[in-house]
Amino acid sequence: MRLFIAINFSNDLRSRLLELRDDLCSQSERGSFVPPENLHLTLAFLGECDGKQTDAAKNAMSETLFDPFDIHIESLGRFKRDGGDIWWAGVRENKALLDMQSNLTKKLIRAGLKLDSKKYTPHITLGRKVMTRLAPRKIEPFGQTVSQIDLMKSERIDGVLTYTSIFTKRGV
């Protein structure tokens, strides 16, 4: 099963992200835009996992202690790609988020899971293969309090990419 660990959003924050996504979509020649229910902030991508690895991920999450903290979305940016860019909403630099993600990653690696070694850059993907004349920019900040993280299963159901929470770790 294909897994990742993420922060899911309140309805209010999701609505604000949808406004950004819809504005991007309306000003783009083309692109593949993320459905509302799939908007999230990835903390760790685990990839294909068997039952033992899934249990190891749940244990690592259980051992990751964090106090609830606030995140703020403050920019619209892109990763340049041939054939269209990946556009995202950027998260304001946040020590609590980075500390929690680093602690979680260390526990996952210690549990034997293989993770990407790139520096963690918190962002929320809004669209892929996007062709637009828009430029990255700062936006009026908005946010929410993060009080839990979720182990998410990614699968195609009737041809639709679907994310389902299979385990939740709440902050202390």
Image (cartoon, rainbow, N blue to C red):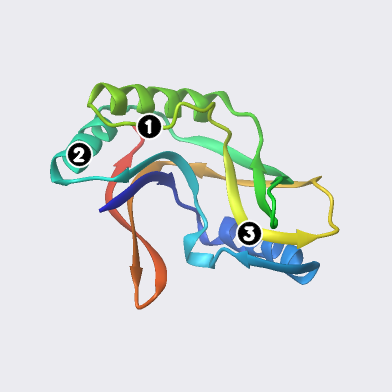
Q: Which residue is mark 2?
A: 53
Asked whether the beta carbons under mark 1 and mark 3 sit within 8 Å of each other, the answer is: no
Residue 73 vertical placement versus 84 (above, below): above
Callout 1, which amino acid? Leu
Q: How busy is the neighbourhood of tag 2: few (under 14 within 10 Å), some, or many (20 plus)?
A: some
Q: How busy is the neighbourhood of tag 3: few (under 14 within 10 Å), some, or many (20 plus)?
A: many
Q: Position of residue 129 (x, y in %)?
A: 65, 59
Residue 57 vertical placement versus 78 (above, below): above
Question: Is 134 displayed left or right of 16 in the figure?
Answer: right
Front residue of this view, candidates 123 and 69: 123
Q: Residue at x 43, y 32 (%)?
A: 116
Callout 2, which amino acid? Gln
Residue at the limit of the structure toward the front, as seen here: 82
Residue 112 vertical placement versus 127 (above, below): above
Earlier in the chain: of badge 2 and badge 1, it is 2
Q: How busy is the neighbourhood of tag 1: few (under 14 within 10 Å), some, or many (20 plus)?
A: some
Front residue of this view, candidates 133 and 42: 133
Q: Which residue is mark 1?
A: 115
* Mark 3 → mark 2, Cα distance in angstroms: 30 Å
Residue 151 appears in view: no
Q: Position of residue 15 (x, y in %)?
A: 61, 63
Element type at marker 3?
strand
Q: Which residue is mark 3?
A: 127
- Quarter of the image holding residue 110? top left
Element type at marker 2?
helix
Front residue of this view, candidates 49 and 147: 49
Earlier in the chain: of badge 3 and badge 2, it is 2
Q: Residue at x 47, y 22 (%)?
A: 99
Element type at marker 1?
loop
Callout 3, which amino acid? Gly
